[in-house]
Image (cartoon, rainbow, N blue to C red):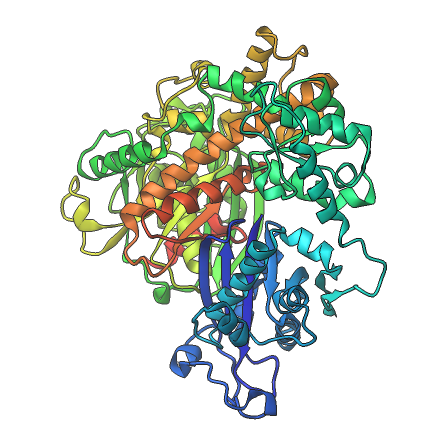
Amino acid sequence: MNYLAFDIEAANGYKPDSICSVGIVVADENFNILYKTNIWVNPKTAYNLNGTRKNVGIDLHLDKKLLNSSPDFAHVYQNIRDFLTNPQYIVMGHAVDADVRMLNAACKRYRLPSINFRFICTQLLYKLYKGEKDVKALSKIAAELGITYHEHNSEDDAWMSLQTLKYLVGESNLSVEQLLQKYRVRIGSNENFQLVRPVSLEGQVSKKHLTQQAVEKIKAFAQTVPSEGKSLHGKVFCLARSLELSDSEQLYSVLKKIFSNGGRYSSKLAKGNVYLKNSFSSEQDIMRERRVAEMAATDDIAIQTVEEFLQGDCMKNKALEFLKVHKQTAEEVNEQEQIKLFVDDMHKGLCQKGQTIPMIPTYLCNIDRSKIKFGKRILIDAGGTNFRSAVGSFDQNGKAVIEKLRKTTMPASGGEVLSKQQFYDRIAQNIAYLCDDGEDVGFCFSYPVNMASDMDGEVVSFSKEVKAPEVIGTKVGAETLASLAKYSDKPRKIVILNDTVATLLGGMATSHEKFSTYLGYIYGTGTNICCIVDTDKITKVEGLPKGKMLVNMECGGYDKFPTGDFDKAAIHRTDLPNSQLYEKMTSGKYLAEIIHEALCVALKEGYIESAVGAFDLKDVSQFLTEDDGAIYHMLSEKDREFAREVCRQLIKRAAKLGAITNAATASVTCTDKSLPVAVVAEGTTFNRLVGYRNWFEKYLGEYLSHFGITYKIVQGEELNLVGTLMATMVL
């Protein structure tokens, strides 16, 4: 669980809806800064900082020229909302009530929905920890802690709020959860414009000393337990609160096994890697178990019942042992080595044809959002599974409007084999209903093509098990228009682009923040990246215009990641086992098959006793979050925790591979380290596969920090179609 601190400043003391800046700082569980920004907002009101007694003398360090050129609150609303409502963040602020009131006022001013979220107040926690009657301003806390910062700058105030919480956690040796429990603090919330303030409930019956007493009792007992071995060396155990606070025989049996075998105990979840829960959940346990369940998807923490622990080994250890034998753990992949190899292959792809990372020029160069044209366009999105069509346009405010959207299956997928003519006729049939609505055509084609300067592309190959061999070598645009002519004789132009290119352009079209560069990242049925490269580095093509060009990397064919036994077995069963190796090790089309292969081998080798039938990634996500579903019912109770850990570890590995490729790409294309890299991420698997995104972001932040680079995940609705539309409008 990461921390998010925020702070808001208003440009007019009389008007709480006059938000002019929103500072955001994100940190990991150890308070390492992952991302920070000031979201500047045009307040669209007169500036008045001295209109109220409270605001006299405040210097917000405002650059009015910058603010007046910034988007208004309505245009940054979604970005702010995405930050504050992200369930992966513990949200905090200093004197946060005022900030929430300003948010509500601004939302009402622009007739936007309430931003519903929960938060804690560092000002309140600091007061309670110090035992003081009155709250303190950030500047006074900073002075007490010996910290220098720029007061009333939103980003800096948010950062100082985070430092306050870091101090409280470090000095008290308590987690945030424990601090809240110790001082009986009710977490604040905002729901449908109804603010519930964070307050202390100290007046009620409190058990604030019980946890500390329990910790001291356990530490004292540890001193009495003789060593009998080291089988639990490196394991740090956290206990269910009901067990921790008990004085039961079961507690002492658990503690004896931990300490006699070299294990350790911690009351802090963040320091543990094994959580022991009771067979029942008391009220004391509920909050802690929710936190552990969230951690288990992304962190190295195993969940085990007390009974299981006393009976046998942790399932996580067995699963890791099994995966290590077959070279399928994330730890088998050396990120430093792989980033270097990937970067080397990128440079080769820019200089030479026929490389494993082809680095295909798109001829989309020097994209300028201000040059967007008007009119309607026919939009096509041919993905790994779905074929979508729509008509699109930009309104007078530059917002994309997508209409008449239809979805069907991708031609030549699902075992269907089509000839060239059948393939293109099927495409024309699917979009014929739009002929009277749109002019030119934008075609997002999610397969490798060699692009030409006329924005048409020649099909290089099919992946994702699409079967239309006669289509390879044909011009997608020309053939599509030829088939479409059967339904309409209107002359049309067509622009062909890859889904990663469309995703990048979609993020560029909808984002109003400043970034050093953009990456388009697809993690769905397949996987790929698009980036922006100086044309003078693309030496394999002559005569390119000067500037920055979007490059479709087609990195699914990267072949230097170490393959494990389950990778090899799953890849061998594909139609073209020697192609798209990276994609087949990680993407949504193949990852379920790798997990299935692992469980089949586990059965043969005696790790589990249950045979499993076919399943997909939706089943995997359900299995990891529910006691239900196809996989759950195929396995015995004894086998489920082992299987869950296998799933978690293989997802973790896939996320690491994705983070490596994105970090390597960012290290080559980032032009200004003072600005974050925008990773425009799309794909059902990225958004829905339990644990993937969290691990991806954790690894990506870590790897980019070595280069001094920060990043931000950018997402939006229908980015592929919006990006495809943009490509037709800026040429």
Q: Is residue 548 left or right of residue 134?
A: left
Q: Is residue 452 left or right of residue 662?
A: left
Q: How many discs mark residues in the rendered view?
A: 0
What is the quadrant of the C terminus in the image? bottom left
Above or below, 645 against 218 in this view is above
Of the pair 267 and 704, the residue shown nearer to us: 267
In the image, farthest residue toward the front? 224
- Residue 193, given in percent of the width and then of the height, sits at 72, 69
Q: Is residue 105 left or right of residue 565?
A: right
Q: Residue at the location (53% across, 36% down)?
A: 386
- Residue 449, given in percent of the width and then of the height, sits at 32, 35
Q: Quadrant of residue 471?
A: top left
Q: Say whether residue 180 is visible.
A: yes
Q: Quadrant of residue 448?
A: top left
Above or below, 84 against 255 in this view is below
Q: Say whether residue 397 is visible.
A: no
Q: Residue at the location (72% across, 27% down)?
A: 254
Above or below, 78 against 451 in this view is below
- Residue 537, given in percent of the width and then of the height, sits at 18, 46
Of the pair 709 and 150, the residue shown nearer to us: 150
- Residue 589, given in percent of the width and then of the height, sits at 51, 28
Q: Is residue 709 left or right of residue 172?
A: left
